[in-house]
Amino acid sequence: MTSVKDFLKTSKITKSILSVLALLIIQFVPAPRNYSLFINNCFSQESWTATSLTEAPTPRERHSAIWTGTNLIVWGGTGGSSLSTNTGGVYNNSSDTWTPTSLTGAPTARIAHIGVWTGTKMVVWGGNLNGSYLSTGGIYDPALDTWTPTTTANSPSGGNNPTAIWTGSKMIVWGGYNGSYLNTGGQYDPNSNTWMQTSTSNAPSGRQYHTAVWTGNKMIVWGGYNVTNYYNTGAAYDPAADTWTPISTNNAPTGRIWQTAVWTGSKMIVWGGYANTVYNNTGGIYNPAVDTWTPTSTVNAPSGRDWHTAVWTGSKMIVWGGYNGSVYFNSGGIYDPATDIWTSMTDLNAPGARYHHTALWTGNKMIAWGGFGNSTYYNTGGVYFNPDVTGITNINAETPAAYSLKQNYPNPFNPVTVIRFQVTGSSNVSITILDINGREVQTLINKKLNAGTYSVDWNASDFPSGVYFYRMTAEDFIETKNMMLVR
């Protein structure tokens, strides 16, 4: 039998109506009940919250964005009429405030560039300014609000729409378009401000509008376009050996552009995109360990689209926004690769329909910002929260001897910590965060789990320093431990 919660999650109309009813109950029935827990049990507290407009960057599309661990930084892009910008802003979700980025020493204005986060700084590079293809860039230090230019010595050819990943020590850029479709790239070391060009031996054919992910030791690029071909080909690049290895096309998704790709920790998921007048709602899961593809289900998948965004939550992929040739979307979907199942996400209070926006995962929320839709350039955005998509990982499927809640690590921490726990059989498991006064401030998990050992991350970037408690409830088991957030 379908549970009330599962039924409600399948009906946006029902959820919207009952959300209003719940608010009316809270407003007019002053009983000492935990309404937040009631709403969580019914709707999983799924919600959109608008980002502030105060001091937000000017409206734009085709900008870059990174997540620092505590803040969102957006930079560059265009607000129309070929007017590119070199302005940006730092958004603090905890305080819902924007701070402009410095213009002193900033790179020249541009669109269709890339940006990566090094752990302490943002690197932007490449792109296009009024038809001029750029091989310049800059390093932005948010702690000092300063820019440092990237060298052009030995840099790759500049162009539109390259891809970029961060390896942990270097930025790798590849591909793009500058009048020719490029199969060149480079490894950039921000510490030494030096470039090393990537090999073209066995590299994929030149292209733009492709995607790239970092596996931990290799970069995988896939898809894209080069005048006549929509590619469903790709390759894995090993930066240590400077070598390329083609990946299988057997069961790969059809060739396409403007798709998204995420890395799950062991596999790459690509989804959506456009080719030959078709807006796809298909995708595939690529396993580099065995060089195989598995198609993603289309049952309950979002409508086909391109120029949407996708984030990986630690357990699921969220896609949102995009365009299908006639409609701009402010809807999306949540994909669970473990079960090959799509579920809908609410569009109640979601930002306006758009594409060419950016979206990033904070550790417990998705922030979408900017973009273009329905003749409007946006400087609005939204913060999407849903505890059902937080990063829970099944570490071991063997049945433990008893329920247990482990001490978090690291502890003290800033801002992310890992909580491990064990479940002896199929049961509903709840893990909640409480403040020093014992008030529930966040639900990390509230769902049915099978026997096994699990971990879940808590990103406390929205919370002040101090002592917190985390509580696990499962069947008759209840245990609480404390931890310390130190800023």
Image (spheres, rainbow, N blue to C red):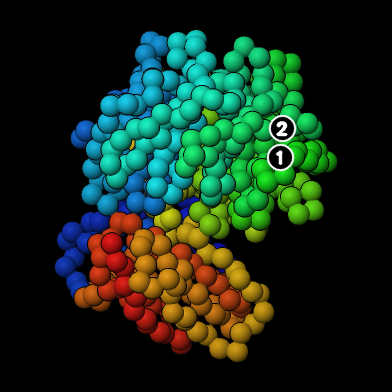
Q: Tell me whether the residue at label 2 lies in contact with that at label 1, contact meaning CB atoms closer than 8 angstroms.
A: yes
Position of residue 331 measured from the top left corner of the image (x, y, whole percent): 47, 38
* Residue 319 or residue 190, whichever sits in front: 190
Query: Is residue 417 toward the left or the right of residue 401 in the image?
Result: left
Q: Does any portion of residue 374 appear in the rendered image? A: no
Under mark 1, the amino acid is: Asp
Sequence-first disc among 2 and 1:
2
> Which label belongs to residue 242?
1
User: Compared to 354, does 132 lie above or below?
Assistant: above
* Residue 382 or residue 420, whichever sits in front: 420
* Residue 314 or residue 134, whichever sits in front: 134
**Disc 2 packing (10 Å; few <14; some 14–19; many ≥20):** some
* Residue at 79% across, 32% down: 202
Position of residue 457 measured from the top left corner of the image (x, y, whole percent): 46, 64
> Which label belongs to residue 199?
2
Under mark 2, the amino acid is: Ser
Calculate the distance from the C-alpha at mark 2 to the C-alpha at mark 1.
6 Å
